[in-house]
Image: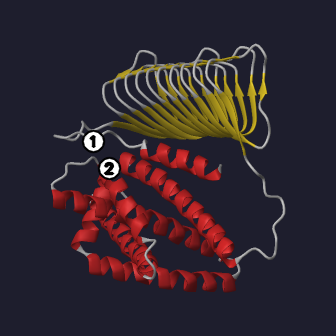
Amino acid sequence: MKQVVLGILVTMMLMMVPTVQAQEVRETPVSRAGEIVTIGKDEVINRDFYVTAGKTVEVLGLVNGDIYAFGGQIVVNGIVNGDVIAAGGQVRIAGNVDQNVRVAGGQVTLSGEVGRNVTMAGGTLDIAENATVGGGLMVAGGNVNLLGSVNGDVLAAGGNVDIGGTVGGDVTAYVGNLRVGAAAKIDGGLLYYSKDLAKIDSEAVIAGETKMEPVEMETNWKPEQTKAELKQAWQSVRMGFRVMGLIGTGIVGLILVSLFPYWNQKVAEKIADKPGMSIGIGLLMLLLAPMVFVFMLITVVGIPLGLLTLVSVAVIGYVAQVVVDYWIGTRIARQFGWKLQPAWSFLLGLVIMFAVSWIPILGPLAKMLAMILGSGAILLTEVELYKKLSKDKVI
């Protein structure tokens, strides 16, 4: 079941990039950021819309393009003639979305109308009674409540899944507990994987076959477990952590590339123009950071500054992987004559580095080199920016 959930999350991340156009890159999107960002009822945006907010993102107007939203609370209550890709603590889609919805959050609620497919991941996922999905539904969460209408198939993975709405196709569920209520109407079949029998109300309508695939739950680990089994278990855990790392880096990278395209481009240029200097500065940063931290610990009063130094180095090192992935993707795209949007260039580099990371010896060395190279390029870019602002007397 864990592999299925991971598969759904990976699929969701891959769907969080704009569509590639064969001839040209789409118009420059509109981007906004702040504590609270609102698109008013009378406001119209005729491009893709990228937005991040510390607290709330609220879309009440009309967006003729895709929405990429990240924040504490996200509310889409207007009309979107494109896709909605969102991640936040609370996400509520109550308006009309012409294309697809791909969302993740602690609590996600869909109560509007979606023209095509919906992908949801999070703690509690609610498809309200008045919600309509024109295509299929893919969900992975702790608690899943499907009360609305889905015209296509449903794929669900969760601890508790409650179906009380209408499904036009088949339902496949990987669950701890499954309940099919009296108001449920499934035009296809129901296949579920669980250790417990589903609670299906006698008034529920299931047109196709209902089938349960039992899932055996291992409760006792035996010390005499073979070496091969232990190795296989470790490989599964290792793959899980790497996939989750891939998803996390992918989401962070998409945010950075989408909201700060000029900055990413400048850092990538530094990597291409000054690779040796970038490596030297990045290596110097990694060597000096522990020394500064130890020195601050000795002074006692400098402990907060020492901790801040370590956190800063960690953040720069993480972001460095993103910019190197972006640089690799743009180099390969240019080599083959591909016209890719920045998000696709980043994703191309991300997948290549993920594949390289599995090669013994070479993989860890490549990741270390990427962190050093990217960190140095970031510092060079920031120093250049500081000098420019000082020259212009901005700071």
x and y percentages locating residue 349 in the rendered image: 34, 60
Question: Which quadrant: the C terminus?
Answer: bottom left
Q: Determine the CA span between mark 2 and mark 1.
A: 8 Å
Task: Check disc 1: other Cα within 10 Å, few if <14, some if 14-19, many if 20+.
Answer: some
Depth check, front residue: 100 or 72: 100
Q: Image check: 200 left or right of 282?
A: right
**Residue 205: quadrant of the picture:** top right
* Label 2: element kind: helix
Instruction: Tell me whether circle 2 and circle 1 mark residues in contact (CB < 8 Å).
Output: yes
x and y percentages locating residue 350 in the rendered image: 39, 60
Amino acid type of the residue that numbered disc 1 sits on in the rendered structure: Val
Q: What number is the disc on residue 344?
A: 2
Residue 47 vertical position relative to residue 374 in the rendered view, above or below: above
**Which residue carries the number 1 mark?**
20
x and y percentages locating residue 364 in the rendered image: 46, 78
Amino acid type of the residue that numbered disc 2 sits on in the rendered structure: Trp
Q: Residue at x 34, y 24 (%)?
A: 64
Q: Image check: 196 left or right of 386?
A: right
Can residue 281 be seen here? The reply is yes
Q: What number is the disc on residue 289?
A: none
x and y percentages locating residue 75 in the rendered image: 55, 27
Q: Residue at x 42, y 42 (%)?
A: 15
**Residue 65: quadrant of the picture:** top left
Task: Check disc 2: other Cα within 10 Å, few if <14, some if 14-19, many if 20+.
Answer: many
